[in-house]
Amino acid sequence: MINKILGLYKKYKEIILYLIFGVLTTIVSLGTKYILLFIFLDAKNPIQLQTSIVISWMIAVIFAYVTNRIYVFNSTNKNKIKEFISFIIARISTLLLEMLIMWFFVTLLKLNSDLYVVIFTLISQVAVVVANYIFSKLFIFKNSEDK
């Protein structure tokens, strides 16, 4: 049984690590946002609320880049700045994808009950995770050593 689990881990190591660090990235993002909102900023102030969202997104992207580069894709690319910029562009693209999905279903189609918001949030998150992985695997960390 243990050998079978280890075999599956070896076969899907990259995807498993990607998902683990994705969860950790989410924790970093939410933790940063809540620390900012509950200690330093006021959520009732629209500018401070949006500031907390932007700062938490930026910290999460930096965390995701470092962990994806080192642990998930084992990147050996010497041009870290170009790689990081590509990573940011991909993350902005998937942020826009999430916004588009939510706008289309919740705003345009008016499927805006709490249940639909939760459903389309989950759908958009799955699309974002898959797209982020594809961008990372095929475009950003493509020069990484084969495992």
Image (cartoon, helix red, strand yellow):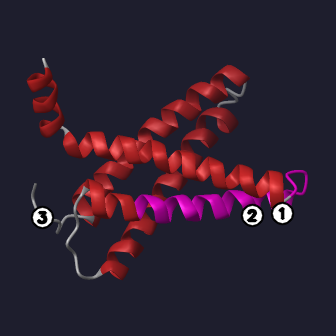
Outermost residue to the right? 44
Secondary structure predominantly adopted by residues drawn in magenta: helix
Outermost residue to the front? 2
- The picture places residue 62, in percent across and down from the top left corner, at 48, 66
Badge 2: residue crowd in 10 Å (few <14, some 14–19, many ≥20): some
What residue appears at the point 39 percent right and 66 percent down from the top-left corner?
A: 87
**Label 1: element kind:** helix
Q: Quadrant of the C terminus?
A: bottom left
Q: Please name the amino acid that badge 1 sits on.
A: Ile
Q: Quadrant of the N terminus?
A: top left
* Residue picked out by circle 1: 47
* Residue picked out by circle 3: 145
How many angstroms separate mark 1 from mark 2 (CA)? 6 Å
- The picture places residue 7, in percent across and down from the top left corner, at 10, 31
114, above or below 130, in the image: above
Magenta region: 42-65
In the drawing, does residue 65 fall left or right of residue 142? right
* Front residue of 124 and 129: 129
What residue appears at the point 47 percent right and 46 percent down from the top-left corner?
A: 24
How many angstroms separate mark 1 from mark 3 (CA)? 43 Å
Badge 1: residue crowd in 10 Å (few <14, some 14–19, many ≥20): few
Q: Please name the amino acid that badge 3 sits on.
A: Glu
**Label 2: element kind:** helix
What residue appears at the point 37 percent right and 81 percent down from the top-left corner?
A: 81
- The picture places residue 21, in percent across and down from the top left corner, at 40, 48
- The picture places residue 74, in percent across and down from the top left corner, at 22, 62
* Front residue of 109 and 39: 39
**Label 3: element kind:** loop
How many angstroms separate mark 2 from mark 3 (CA)? 38 Å
* Front residue of 122 and 3: 3
Say whether residue 52 is magenta: yes
